[in-house]
Image (tube, helix red, strand yellow):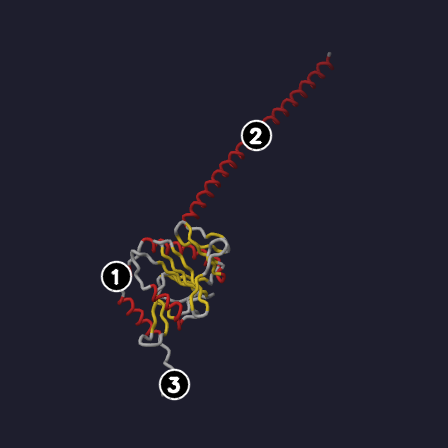
């Protein structure tokens, strides 16, 4: 019996597999419930702030992950709603994330399940993350029910991460915590809640309002100071003129006395 190892798959084979996968998708896969879309938006906005602080944190959205697989299907495929990869250099992945051709595998996958449009077989996906890809962290969120579970791969099985004293679920490797806030999954970085663009806009608007107010006050103070300076200068000029007039009158008086 031959013990020769199967040859590694070529890039072109992964490209062909990705194209075939795309063609096989039903129409409902391209649809997204409002709740799924909203959570995805929050996730991308929040993790963009993490990436600004940690460039090695790279976030992908609805990217096909492909990997070698034993059995009848030699290429495994799965599409997480969002995926986080930790790597210091830019990741080149266009149509798919082909694991053998990448420097590192997924570190964290996130999925949002709506009763109005499940789109995917999430149970099958979880098995792939756990048993085949061995993704360290997996977040599963049911927005309609308000249920959030963060899983951590311990050994060969996913275990749910219990909440800490603040009621948040921690991913220490990223200095991140996740929890529900106002019915959505929100993110804390180093203990601080990551703001959303609307929050940042309100803060910016308030900062601009305060700046305009401070500018108006400074301009008013400068105007008053200028007026006071002009008045002081006028008073000084009047004082000097008065002194000169006094001196003139004294001189005139001395002249008159000298001629009398």
Of callouts 2 and 3, which one flags the residue occurring earlier in the amino acid sequence?
Answer: 3
Q: Is residue 135 above or below residue 224?
A: below
Q: Is residue 231 above or below residue 198?
A: above
**Relative horizontal placement of residue 143, taking residue 234 as reference (left or right):** left
* Secondary element at image label 3: loop
Q: Is residue 193 visible?
A: yes
Q: Is residue 205 above or below residue 109?
A: above
Q: Position of residue 186 (x, y in %)?
A: 42, 53
Point 43% across, 45% down: residue: 202
Circle 1 packing at 10 Å, graded few (<14), some (14-19), many (20+), is: few
Q: Is residue 169 above or below residue 134?
A: above
Q: Position of residue 190 (x, y in %)?
A: 50, 56
Circle 3 packing at 10 Å, graded few (<14), some (14-19), many (20+), is: few
- Numbered label attached to residue 3: 3
Q: Position of residue 40 (x, y in %)?
A: 37, 56
Q: Which mark lies nearer to you, 1 or 3?
A: 3
Of callouts 2 and 1, which one flags the residue occurring earlier in the amino acid sequence?
Answer: 1
Give the Cα separation between the discs numbered 2 and 3: 98 Å
The residue that mark 1 highlights is 27
Point 60% across, 26% down: residue: 235
Mark 1 and mark 2 in contact (Cβ < 8 Å)?
Answer: no
The residue that mark 2 highlights is 228
- State the residue lying farthest toward the bottom: 1
Give the Cα separation between the discs numbered 1 and 3: 43 Å
């Amino acid at each position: 019996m031959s013990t020769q190892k199967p040859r590694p798959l070529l890039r072109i084979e992964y490209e062909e597999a990705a194209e075939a996968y795309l063609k096989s998708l039903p129409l409902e896969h391209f649809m997204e419930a409002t709740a799924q879309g909203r959570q995805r938006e929050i996730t991308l906005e929040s993790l963009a702030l993490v990436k600004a602080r940690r460039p090695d944190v790279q976030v992908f959205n609805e990217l096909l992950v492909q990997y070698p697989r034993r059995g009848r299907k030699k290429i495994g495929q799965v599409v997480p709603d969002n995926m986080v990869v930790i790597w210091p250099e830019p990741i080149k992945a266009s149509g798919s994330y082909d694991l053998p051709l990448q420097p590192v595998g997924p570190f964290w996958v996130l999925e949002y399940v709506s009763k109005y449009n499940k789109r995917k077989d999430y149970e099958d996906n979880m098995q792939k993350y756990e048993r085949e890809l061995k993704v360290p962290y997996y977040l599963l969120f049911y927005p309609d029910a308000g249920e959030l579970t963060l899983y951590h791969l311990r050994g060969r099985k996913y275990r749910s991460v219990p909440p800490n004293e603040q009621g948040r679920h921690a991913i220490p490797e990223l200095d991140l915590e996740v929890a529900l806030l106002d019915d959505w999954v929100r993110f804390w970085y180093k203990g601080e809640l990551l703001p959303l663009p609307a929050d940042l806009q309100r803060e910016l608007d308030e900062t601009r309002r305060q700046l305009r107010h401070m500018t108006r006050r400074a301009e008013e103070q400068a105007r008053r100071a200028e007026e006071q300076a002009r008045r002081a200068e006028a008073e000084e000029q009047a004082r000097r003129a008065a002194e000169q007039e006094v001196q003139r009158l004294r001189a005139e008086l001395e002249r008159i006395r000298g001629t009398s």
